């Protein structure tokens, strides 16, 4: 059971609040998420200095809600830009809807400026352990080699999304993207984006889209340049091409289960709030949707015997 939730909810939502306020920002995304969840879930809400709110009715644990609200309202809505990235490893349009609806609800806004979808149904579990991330962050960081300095750099994931996920992966991606399109058509999301696709998969998605993606993200952590065909496709279709360093699997199940025993991650997202005129990052946080496995009929029968 999650330490600060006393009831056994089937579904829970965990919001880290503004991690910039906790000095967790500007690090690797898996480290930010892990430490943000650890602070939120393992703080005693009865201690005066702790600002963790528990919504027992909806099964939510939210950290520093008032501070986040202040950050979002200190400027007019037209003066800030809110962007989010949804990390999904399971094919579920319900998870997409849960993620977007929860984002709008927790930030208390009617729309966000952009949402990028990262879908990796066959994600490689290569995320580095982060159990001691907070302690290690105070020590000198080890030197990191540039992939370009290696004699034989590993092939970029941007070039093999189609190969790894196949035609079925593209079909699933289109279904998930269609769920996001409904929010764009209802003016709840201004721009849609997609992460880590090769040119072939991006072209397939673009061809069938009712609301074409205007943002494409590629991970350059294991390569030195964006493939030419992807650059050309984005240039020809007015798609902004950005780079990122997020892992395919943001937080492995074994690490999450150490924080929230009995629950597994359904979806996770990161949001960032910038002041438009200055480009200043004023808020950044993570929201996670998790659930408990539904017991099978045979398991329930044994339990009641």
Image (cartoon, grey):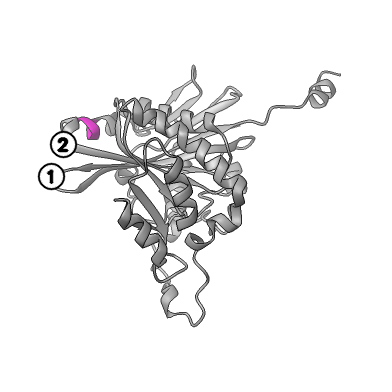
Q: Are marks 1 and 2 in contact (CB under 8 Å)?
A: yes
Q: Residue at x 62, y 37 (%)?
A: 261
Nearer to the camera, 277 or 160: 160
Task: Give the magenta-colored segment's residue range.
Answer: 70-74
Occupied quadrant, residue 286: top left
The answer to whether residue 275 is seen in the rendering is yes
Spatial CA distance of label 1 from label 2 is: 7 Å
The residue that label 2 is drawn on is 79
Where is 257 relative to 247, above or below? above
Residue at image x 24%, y 33%?
72
Residue furthest bottom in the image = 151
Task: State whether the magenta stretch is mostly helix, strand or loop.
Answer: helix
Q: Position of residue 10 (x, y in %)?
A: 60, 25
> Label 2 crowding class (10 Å Cα cut-off): few <14, some 14-19, many 20+?
few
Determine whether 159 is above or below 190 in the image: below
At 45% from the left and 24% from the top, the residue drawn is 54
In the rendered structure, which disc, 1 or 2, sits on the residue that comes first in sequence? 2
Foreground residue, 204 or 45?
Answer: 204
1 sits to left or right of 186: right
| Residue drawn at x 61%, y 45% as measured from the top left | 168
Image quadrant occupied by the C terminus:
top right
Residue 277's disc number: 1
Residue 260 pos. (x, y %) = 57, 37
- Residue 47 visible (yes or no): no
Residue 111 lies in quadrant = top left
Quadrant that contains the N terminus:
top right
Is residue 73 covered in magenta? Answer: yes
Q: Is residue 45 left or right of residue 113?
A: right
Residue 49 spot, x, y in % from top left: 34, 34
Location of residue 278 with respect to 66 vertically, above or below: below
Mark 1, Cα crowd under 10 Å, few <14 / some 14-19 / many 20+, is few
Looking at the image, residue 259 lies above or below residue 57: below
């Amino acid at each position: 059971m999650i330490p600060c939730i006393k009831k056994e909810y089937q579904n829970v939502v965990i919001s880290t609040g503004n991690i910039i306020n906790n000095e967790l920002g500007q690090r690797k995304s898996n480290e930010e998420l892990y430490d943000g969840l650890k602070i939120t879930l393992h703080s005693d809400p009865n201690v005066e200095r702790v600002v963790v709110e528990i919504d027992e009715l909806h099964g939510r644990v939210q950290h520093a809600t008032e501070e986040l609200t202040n950050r979002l309202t200190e400027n007019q809505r037209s003066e800030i830009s809110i962007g989010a990235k949804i990390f999904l490893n399971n094919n579920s349009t319900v998870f997409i809807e849960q993620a977007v609806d929860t984002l709008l609800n927790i930030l208390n806004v009617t729309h966000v400026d952009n949402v990028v979808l990262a879908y990796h149904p066959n994600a490689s579990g290569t995320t580095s352990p982060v159990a001691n991330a907070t302690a290690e962050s105070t020590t000198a960081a080890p030197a990191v080699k540039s992939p370009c300095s290696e004699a034989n750099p590993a092939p970029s994931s941007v070039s093999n999304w189609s190969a790894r996920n196949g035609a079925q992966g593209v079909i699933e991606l289109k279904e998930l993207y269609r769920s996001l399109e409904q929010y764009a058509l209802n003016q709840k999301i201004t721009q849609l984006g997609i992460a880590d696709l090769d040119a072939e998969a991006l072209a397939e998605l673009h061809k069938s889209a009712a609301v074409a993606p205007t943002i494409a993200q590629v991970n350059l952590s294991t390569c030195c340049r964006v493939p030419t065909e992807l650059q050309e496709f984005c240039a020809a279709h007015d798609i902004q091409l950005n780079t990122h360093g997020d892992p395919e699997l943001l937080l492995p199940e074994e690490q999450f289960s150490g924080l929230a025993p009995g629950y597994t991650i359904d979806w996770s997202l990161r949001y960032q709030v910038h002041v438009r005129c200055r480009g200043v990052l004023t808020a950044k946080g993570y929201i996670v949707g998790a659930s408990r496995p539904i017991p099978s009929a045979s398991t329930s029968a044994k339990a009641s015997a």
